[in-house]
Image: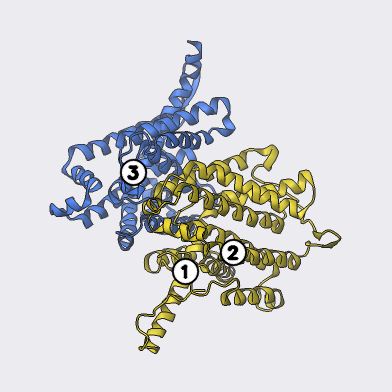
Chain colours: A yellow, B blue
């Protein structure tokens, strides 16, 4: 069930080109199909978040159910830098990533010797602590309301600078960061480190016997994944112009699990990307018809867990495989999983 | 001495809170023990049970015509007792329905069961929101257990005593059921070694169905007892499921008295921290869990279980 290493492990692959062709042209047509610019930012942010999360769930087989905490820590860190320190994009993003990584490392240090359901339970308990602190520590986090009026600092490279106040400008920044994340993670999961993670997913004990320091790998991948969540959280704080405790709740952490799984995070690198798109389209399209869209989305999720845990990408892979076996009966035995 | 006297009411408060927490964890524990399944829908079933009880106690009379009018005119105590029976039975059927769906996940990674019940929790919460709205609701209780009384200059709520006593009673009944009846023996055996149970000719399929139904009924019972204290919101399920799993992990999977003790410990921790830092009292239970589990990997009395693989 581990995502199969693909034959084409180039720096840029065809799905990447397709994804970015769609995303880069999005502002041109999104309003024509009845949606709005801001949706694009949300989708890009959650794609970054879900891709980082899938390092744990899909690649290492670690069920982290409290990932919203690191997303939230990133958002608060970004907000605090803008409000208390200095209006700076780069400093804010760095603070978001580092704060989330620190929080992640703290938790990972406590739980990396655990496995399976105990691991899931401990991630929930730790996430609740962060959520609770965010709600109660009024003087820093602003309590239930959160940090308001977080600035959108300008994107500046020395003398060149561009305002990010418009949603389209911020969208392009989010897509650029998503691009870096996709390319970086693609390299990462195909590196030796990524291979070790997949070995841990298949059998932790065996990976240990082969000589991998399993604890260290689990610790590092959790910290990295938390850092990516923090990056996404920083962008989210900029998009929302605020940071609030809701995103740290169990409910919000559950959404990223659902997106990753529905898309097919168990079998593909692209699962989280597809799942995020499905979620937001379901929200806005089903939401236009009925107030109760979350009910239908939940039922869909239950169905997918029972009947097709490989998700949308898994169903697509089955389809491709079936067509190939029907078409080319000569080449038996070369049923490589089509990914990439 | 004065210090102890000062703390005594808080200790009592913590103890009663602890029994309530243990009560919430009871059904969760049965399901985790026999099915090796984390039922994340436990909290939502808890909430749904309380909402159903609310309808049984005070249905919209206009729906049912004269029969409804006659029913609402009956004494509240009667309707309350009826709700205590009917709502858990209805919820038991809901639980059995979930179990039938869950059969597809048996033998796979336990993660699938957890994910499925997470989806179920979301669906149930949305259903509650659709049927009853998001506003806070209240569960009526009979006059006899409502109100307050005075002991040594301190005001106590009668209902809290009633709730703690019923929680204790239910815990004892479930324990007697598990220890003193053949069905209890089957459930315990099923938790210990399900293959062997099947080999002995016990219908494991039916056993699991019944345990899930029973666990859900206990969740509903806990919901009905606790709803008058916590209030009823669609979101209340999350407030219930988190202490439930926390207590099981703290007490150790597979240990009945471990869970009860953990419930009491959590109750005491919350109540005593509330004396000094009331804002932060709920945080104490998470910190207690993290502290215990860091040093005792399987909780206080846990045995090795499938959940670690």
Query: Height in image: B267 above or below A177?
Result: above
Please tell me which residue is depicted at 25% across the width and 52% down the height of the picture.
B210
Q: Position of residue B55 (x, y in %)?
A: 41, 51
Dot 2, how many residues are within 10 Å of its Cα: few (below 14), some (14-19), or many (20+)?
A: many
Identify the chain of the residue marked 3, using the numbered disc in the image: B
**Residue drawn 62% across the image and 63% down it:** A181
Looking at the image, which is closer to me, A187 or A65? Answer: A187
Q: Which residue matches tag 3?
A: B29
Q: Is disc 1 surrounded by few (<14), some (14 to 19) or many (20+) residues within 10 Å?
A: some
Asked if one can make out residue A215 in the rendered structure from this viewpoint, the answer is: yes
Q: Position of residue A330 (x, y in %)?
A: 36, 89
Which residue was labeled with disc 1? Answer: A5
Chain ID, mark 1: A
> Mark 1 and mark 2 in contact (Cβ < 8 Å)?
no
What distance separates the C-alpha of mark 3 from that of mark 1?
40 Å
Q: Secondary structure at mark 3?
A: helix
Q: Quick one: which residue is furthest to the left in this view? A: B200
Q: Residues at marks 3 and 2, common chain? A: no
* Disc on res. A47: 2
């Amino acid at each position: 069930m581990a995502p199969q290493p693909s034959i084409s492990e180039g720096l840029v692959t065809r799905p990447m080109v397709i994804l970015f062709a769609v995303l880069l042209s999005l502002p041109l047509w999104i309003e024509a199909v009845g949606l709005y610019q801001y949706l694009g930012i949300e989708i890009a942010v959650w794609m970054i978040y879900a891709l980082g999360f899938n390092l744990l769930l899909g690649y290492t087989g670690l069920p982290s159910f409290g990932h919203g905490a690191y997303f939230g820590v990133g958002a608060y860190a970004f907000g605090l830098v803008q409000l208390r320190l200095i209006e700076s994009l780069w400093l804010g993003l760095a603070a978001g990533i580092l704060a989330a990584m620190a929080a992640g490392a703290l938790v990972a240090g406590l739980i990396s010797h655990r496995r399976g359901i105990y691991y899931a339970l401990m991630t929930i308990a730790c996430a609740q602590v962060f959520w609770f602190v965010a709600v109660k520590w009024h003087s820093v986090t602003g309590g239930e309301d959160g940090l308001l009026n977080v600035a959108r600092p300008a994107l500046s490279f020395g003398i060149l600078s561009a305002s990010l106040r418009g949603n389209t400008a911020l969208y392009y920044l989010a897509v650029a960061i998503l691009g870096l994340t996709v390319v970086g993670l693609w390299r990462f999961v195909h590196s030796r480190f990524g291979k070790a993670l997949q070995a841990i997913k298949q059998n932790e004990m065996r990976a240990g016997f082969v000589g991998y320091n399993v604890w260290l790998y689990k610790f590092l991948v959790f910290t990295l994944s938390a850092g990516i969540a923090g990056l996404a959280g920083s962008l989210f704080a900029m998009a929302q112009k605020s940071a609030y405790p809701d995103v740290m709740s169990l409910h919000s952490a559950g959404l990223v699990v659902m997106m990753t799984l529905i898309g097919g995070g168990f079998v593909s690198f692209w699962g989280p990307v597809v799942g995020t798109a499905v979620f937001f389209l379901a929200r806005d399209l089903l939401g236009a018809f009925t107030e109760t869209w979350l009910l239908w989305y939940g039922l869909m999720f239950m169905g997918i867990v029972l009947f097709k845990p490989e998700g949308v990408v898994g169903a697509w892979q089955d389809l491709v495989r079936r067509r190939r076996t029907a078409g080319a009966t000569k080449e038996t035995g070369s049923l490589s999983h089509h990914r990439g | 001495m004065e210090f102890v006297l000062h703390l005594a009411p808080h200790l009592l408060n913590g103890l009663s809170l602890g029994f309530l927490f243990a009560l919430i964890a009871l059904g969760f524990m049965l399901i985790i023990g026999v099915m090796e399944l984390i039922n994340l829908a436990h909290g939502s079933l808890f909430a749904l049970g309380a909402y159903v009880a609310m309808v049984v106690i005070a249905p919209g009379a206009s729906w049912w015509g004269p029969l409804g009018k006659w029913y609402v005119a009956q004494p509240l105590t009667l309707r309350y007792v009826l709700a205590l029976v009917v709502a858990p039975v209805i919820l038991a059927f809901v639980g059995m329905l979930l179990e039938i769906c869950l059969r597809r996940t048996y033998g796979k990674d336990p993660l699938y069961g957890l994910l499925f019940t997470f989806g179920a929790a979301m669906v149930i919460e949305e259903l509650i929101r659709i049927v009853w709205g998001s506003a806070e609701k209240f569960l009526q209780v009979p006059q006899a257990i409502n109100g307050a009384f005075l002991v040594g200059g301190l005001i106590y709520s009668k209902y809290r005593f009633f709730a703690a006593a019923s929680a204790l009673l239910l815990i004892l009944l479930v324990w007697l059921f598990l220890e003193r009846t053949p069905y209890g023996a089957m459930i315990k055996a099923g938790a210990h070694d399900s293959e062997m149970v099947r080999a002995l000719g016990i219908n494991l399929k039916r056993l699991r169905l019944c345990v899930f139904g029973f666990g859900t009924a206990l969740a509903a019972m806990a919901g009905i007892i606790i709803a008058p204290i916590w209030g009823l919101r669609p979101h209340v399920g999350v407030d219930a499921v988190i202490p439930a799993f926390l207590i099981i992990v703290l007490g150790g999977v597979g240990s009945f008295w471990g869970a009860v003790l953990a419930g009491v410990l959590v109750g005491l921790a919350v109540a005593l921290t509330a004396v000094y830092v009331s804002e932060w009292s709920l945080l104490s239970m998470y910190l207690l869990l993290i502290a215990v589990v860091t040093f005792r990997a399987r909780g206080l009395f846990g045995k090795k279980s499938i959940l670690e693989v």
